[in-house]
Image: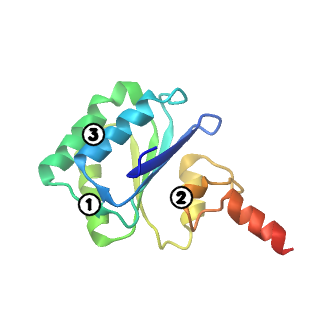
């Protein structure tokens, strides 16, 4: 994986988890998109959680349009899916909302969620069709339940 992002595909759950680190720019988004597309577990219709928390957003309006066009160009390949953009600040929420507006004509369900939502984990599970006890990949970190969290709870008992 890259130091700019990590991802995990869970074909049995029909979901791709992505976490960006440091900076989000057009080159990083294209590189990550290609890596996910080329992965042997990748398939059309997979739901996605894109974690952009605490990242610097380095995208011009033109580059944001380029990302929208990239998503549009992959429409047939990706199929219908739900994508959640997880954000931590007003700027990233603003960029996310602009992107959603640019691709609104596609039959993709996009949700932008704040990282400080007290019901975040429940909303993510509902939107992605995951059961309430789902164990999230560790690289997503808090507030998501991971194997590490389950192990530490088990050890405390």
Q: Residue 90 placed where, x, y %?
A: 29, 71
Which residue is situated farthest in the right direction here? 157
Judged left or right of residue 29, residue 131 is: right
Say above or below: 15 vs 140.
above
Task: Give the residue displayed 39% in from the left and 58% down from the top.
Answer: 21
Residue at image mark 2: 140
Residues at marks 2 and 1, CA–CA distance in whole angstroms:
18 Å
User: Horizontal and vertical percent for residue 84?
Assistant: 44, 52
Task: Work out how far the residue at label 3 is from the one at label 1, CA to CA, in angstroms.
Answer: 24 Å
Q: Which residue is mark 1?
A: 57
Question: Which tag, 3 or 1, sits closer to the chain's start?
Answer: 1
> Residue 78: x, y in percent?
41, 30
Q: Earlier in the sequence, mark 2 or mark 1?
A: 1
Disc 2 element? helix
Task: Mark 1: give few (<14), some (14-19) or many (20+) Cα within 10 Å.
Answer: some
Is 54 displayed left or right of 132 in the figure?
Answer: left
Q: At numbered mark 3, what does the secondary structure look like: helix, strand or loop?
A: loop
Q: Which residue is mark 3?
A: 105
- Label 3, label 2: how many angstroms apart (C-alpha)? 30 Å
Dot in front, 3 or 1: 1
Residue 42 in the image: above or below residue 111 = above
77 and 33: which is toward the camera: 33
Q: Quadrant of the C terminus?
A: bottom right
Q: Position of residue 150 (x, y in %)?
A: 74, 63
Secondary structure, mark 1, is strand
Disc 3 or 2, which lies upstream in sequence?
Answer: 3
Q: Which residue: 42% across, 31% down?
A: 37
Relative depth, front residue between 63 and 31: 31
Residue at the spot x=33%, y=39% of the render?
A: 31
Q: Is residue 67 left or right of residue 112?
A: left
């Amino acid at each position: 994986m890259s130091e700019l992002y990590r991802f995990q595909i869970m074909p049995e759950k029909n979901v791709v988890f992505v976490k960006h680190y440091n900076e989000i720019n057009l080159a990083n988004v294209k590189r990550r998109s290609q890596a996910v597309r080329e992965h042997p577990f990748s398939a059309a219709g997979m739901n996605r959680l894109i974690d952009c928390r605490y990242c610097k957003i380095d995208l011009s309006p033109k580059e944001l349009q380029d990302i929208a066009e990239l998503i549009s160009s992959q429409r047939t390949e990706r199929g219908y899916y739900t994508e959640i953009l997880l954000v931590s600040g007003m700027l990233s929420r603003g960029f996310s909302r602009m992107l959603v507006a640019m691709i609104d004509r596609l039959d993709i369900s996009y949700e932008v969620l704040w990282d400080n939502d007290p019901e975040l984990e429940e909303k993510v599970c509902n939107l992605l069709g995951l059961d309430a006890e789902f164990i999230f990949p560790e690289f997503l970190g808090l507030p998501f339940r991971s194997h590490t969290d389950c192990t530490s709870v088990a050890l405390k008992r």
